[in-house]
Image (spheres, rainbow, N blue to C red):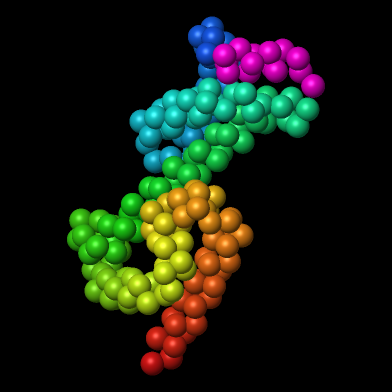
Amino acid sequence: MSQQDWMLMHRVAAGEEAAVTELYDRFSSLVFRVARQLLPTQADAEDAVQEVFIRLWQTADRYDPRRAKLVTWVMLIARRHLIDRLRRNAVRGTMSSFEGDPASTSPDRAPDRRPQEAERNVRLLKRISELPKLQRTVIERAYLQGFTLREVSQQLEAPLGTVKSALSRGLARLRERAKADWAV
């Protein structure tokens, strides 16, 4: 257990500017390298690094040196943030293609597949709309809007287990209906 790391994070939590600078100086290049590997542009990676350090500052009081080294904790926060960012970006792309935006269709896709994909997306949205309300809401928020299940649970003021069950049942129902669609 590193007393220095704990003290640094204690100072960051207190809003001490020198501590935030020290934390940034120690870990920004590592976080940037990982962000650059995962994100499409340098600008995206730079933005993500700033967002990660804001998140680190906001959660600094939760650091426990008995549970993890500081570098491990920083990279865990960075990884979670980057995954959330990738999920949001993917959802935005999916939502555009669901809405039938021709500009959102990637140029490397064969033009003859666009009508099939649009038809499939319309069927999927129709099937989602036919689900019971809770299942529909959970799937829309988790998959189409990019929220985590914990966030959906908080938004709906429902237990996390209930949200997970609704997601599982909803996805199972969609799979059953998709099999029926393919059989036709």
Q: Is residue 103 above or below residue 15?
A: below
> Most extreme residue toward the left, as rendered?
102
> Most extreme residue toward the top, as rendered?
18
Q: Position of residue 3 (x, y in %)?
A: 76, 14
Q: Is residue 109 above or below residue 83?
A: below
Q: Position of residue 86 (x, y in %)?
A: 44, 46
Q: Nearer the viewer, residue 104 or 171?
A: 171
Q: Residue at x 38, y 54 (%)?
A: 145
Q: Is residue 176 above or below residue 44?
A: below
Q: Position of residue 73 (x, y in %)?
A: 65, 30
Quadrant of the rendering where the N terminus is positioned: top right
Q: Tell me where residue 19 sits by quadrant.
A: top right
Q: Residue at x 55, y 40 (%)?
A: 80
Q: Is residue 4 magenta?
A: yes
Q: Report the predominant secondary structure element of the magenta stretch.
A: helix
**20 left or right, relative to 73:** left
Q: Is residue 169 above or below residue 154?
A: below
Quadrant of the rendering where the C terminus is positioned: bottom left
Q: Position of residue 109 (x, y in %)?
A: 30, 64
Q: Residue at x 28, y 61 (%)?
A: 97
Q: Is residue 19 magenta?
A: no
Q: Tell me where residue 62 sits by quadrant.
A: top right
Magenta-colored span: 1-14
**113 left or right, relative to 39:** left
